[in-house]
Amino acid sequence: MDLANLNNLSEWEKIGLSFTTSVVLSLVIFYNESWIVLFKTVFILFWMFVLPGIGITYLFGGLSFAERFAASVAISAVLVGATAYYLGILGVHVKYSAVILPAIFTAVS
């Protein structure tokens, strides 16, 4: 794949390509680990820190995919972390927050 053709990809293809790149990079770095463990780890990191923020960053006009990707990690970390904290104060157990909150923010965005 030519780097000039990356602009012709859809958003989901770019997210899939970044996910695949992250999995392969994790396999190279953590070569002693099982591939399924690394796949699950990268998947949950994308689930919690990339997907909720990608939709929200559509509100920022004129950003490239790389800028939106980086901003989505920060936005998702803040949203999921702060919401999980305040739900914990209200009595909701934290084990539900890791699954439900990213799904809610992804659906809303």
Image (cartoon, rainbow, N blue to C red):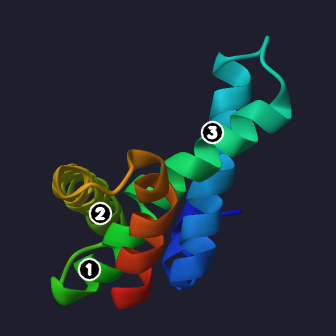
CB-based contact (under 8 Å), mark 2 and mark 1? yes
Is 95 on the left or on the right of 81, as rendered?
A: right
Report the Cα–Cα distance between label 1 and label 3: 23 Å
Point out the residue furthest to the top here: 32
Q: Which secondary structure lies at badge 2?
A: helix
Residue 101 in view in this figure: yes
SS at circle 3:
helix
Left or right? Give the position of 96 relative to 41.
left
Q: Residue placed at 78% from the left, 18% from the top?
A: 33
Q: CA distance from mark 2 to mark 1?
A: 7 Å
Q: Residues within 10 Å of mark 3 (few under 14, many from 20)?
A: some
Image quarter where the N terminus lies is: bottom right
Mark 2 vs mark 1: which is more N-terminal?
1
Measure the C-alpha gap from mark 3 to mark 2.
Answer: 18 Å
In this rendering, the answer to whether 109 lies above or below 4 is: below
Which residue in the protein does label 2 denote? Answer: 72
Q: Quadrant of residue 97?
A: bottom left
Q: Earlier in the sequence, mark 3 or mark 2?
A: 3
Query: Which quarter of the rendered picture does the C terminus lie within?
Result: bottom left
Q: How many marks?
A: 3
Q: Amino acid at mark 1?
A: Ile
Question: Which residue is at 76% across, 32% downward?
Answer: 37
- The residue wearing badge 3 is 41
Mark 1 / mark 3, whichever is N-terminal: 3
The disc label shown at residue 56, or none = 1
Q: Nearer the viewer, residue 55 or 102?
A: 102
Q: Position of residue 2 (x, y in %)?
A: 64, 63
